[in-house]
Amino acid sequence: MNALTEHGLPLIQDADLNGKIVLVRFDHNVVKNGEIRDPFRIDRTIGTLFHIVERGARPIMMTHIGRPREKKTGAIVCRQEESVEPIVQYIEQKLHTRLHVPNFAVDPEKGITGIDTSINLAIKKLRERKIGGIYLPNTRWFYGEETKGEARETLALQLAGLADIYVNDAFGSWQAHASTYDITGHLPSYAGFLMQQEILNLGRVLTPEQPFLAVVAGSKYDTKIRPLYAIYDKVDRLILGGVIYNTYLCAKYNVRFRGVLDEDIALARELVEKDKTQKKIVELPHIVESDTIEGKIEGKYRTISTKDFKAGNSYGYCLDIDPASFEDSAVAAAIGNAKTIFVNAVMGFTPHFTAGSQALDHTIDSNSSAMKMYGGGDTLQEFKDLCPGLYLSVMDNANYYFFTGGGTVLTAIEQGSPYDLKPVQALIESKR
């Protein structure tokens, strides 16, 4: 019995799939402005899709894309650039199959208010194997997906009415929505292979081989506080980057950087105090200061050192880590001695300030024996864009693992277990 079944997680390999219609929820949220940025998340789910078909079942697929619900008005806007069409085209080309995308009526305020009977003909063709699969429209176009009450329950029932079995392979979709949570109350429900892999590898972050080093960055300090403290308590050493690091430096040295908020500096003082005794944070001593955020303009940026900070000093925007920081003896030792390294970090202000991220990835790679785990779409995208040769060389390296959902990983670390994520809980409850 493995860790998954010990926790009561129902697995797709234990489901009776033959002759069944399987409703499978993916996290194929890889479309931006109508184009696929990186098919990595799609590719990671092909194993689950193949398994469903190979065992005699037919798939109805779904994913969310972007944020169609407008914050101010609450209206759901079904924009073409947030449609599933590019994903469908990618899967059709990759698997040499034909998929059907249903076309439902759209309300200008509520998006798609329900699944109508027009889908029945497509389901008939699916059962007769005249089409390879059905891919539903963006789940966030449906009014009931993120709302509460009757509309949500109606959507869950309508989704359940399409299929015999439900499979969740959307590790990156950790919020409890109709298509990830409520649906499990109406169909036999199972975890797909990607979901299983991500949960098992999360265990290696939550109970790591030590010394354990984490590298965490972010554009906002206040949104990362709780997972940051949860990570701090687990690690032996911690490297910070981005606005999080800038905020920490302001709090520690009583200096000011442009763009760092007073209230965030006040929050960071708690971390500074905490680290005075535990001394886990490894300082990156050389940072890149810029007069502008408009770009990397000659004569407008320079490297400064934390050793030169004096209380009360003010600086421009700190937009990157100078690669020289990774040659610092303390930094090199923290990375070189680690047995487990978790990275959820873009070190510089992209797309212009990228040297810090590049140096970080190459320095981490030089520790060939450590287990290296990367979490988050932005982190992975930077790795792929800045170090394409390295990325290709480590894709099948057993000492590397790339999570598909950075937010999910941080949430699981904060909660202390992947089994406390709402969609995972829902799968376990459905089995009981």
Image: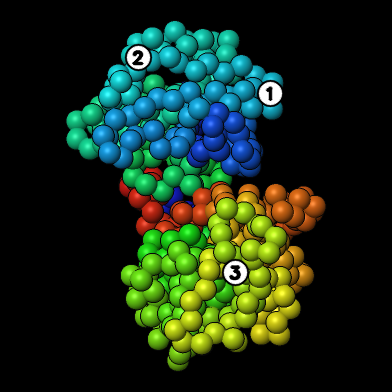
Give the labeled residue for mark 3: 289
Of the numbered discs 3 and 2, the one sitting upstream in the chain is 2
Residue positioned 45% across, 37% down in the render: 66
Of the numbered discs 2 and 1, the one sitting upstream in the chain is 1
SS of the residue at dot 3? strand
Which amino acid type is shown beneath numbered disc 3? Answer: Glu
Q: Residues within 10 Å of mark 3 (few under 14, many from 20)?
A: many
Instruction: Say whether marks 1 and 3 touch (CB < 8 Å).
Output: no
Give the labeled residue for mark 1: 93
- Left or right, residue 156 beside residue 243: left
299 shown above or below 277? above
Give the CA distance from mark 3 to mark 2.
Answer: 52 Å
Instruction: Say whether marks 3 and 2 touch (CB < 8 Å).
Output: no
Instruction: Give the mark count.
Output: 3
Residue positioned 38% across, 40% down in the render: 180
54 shown above or below 347? above
Residue 287 occupies quadrant: bottom right
Residue positioned 54% across, 35% down in the render: 32
Give the CA distance from mark 1 to mark 3.
Answer: 46 Å
Callout in the foreground (1, 3): 3
Give the labeled residue for mark 2: 105
Tell me the colour scheme of the image. rainbow
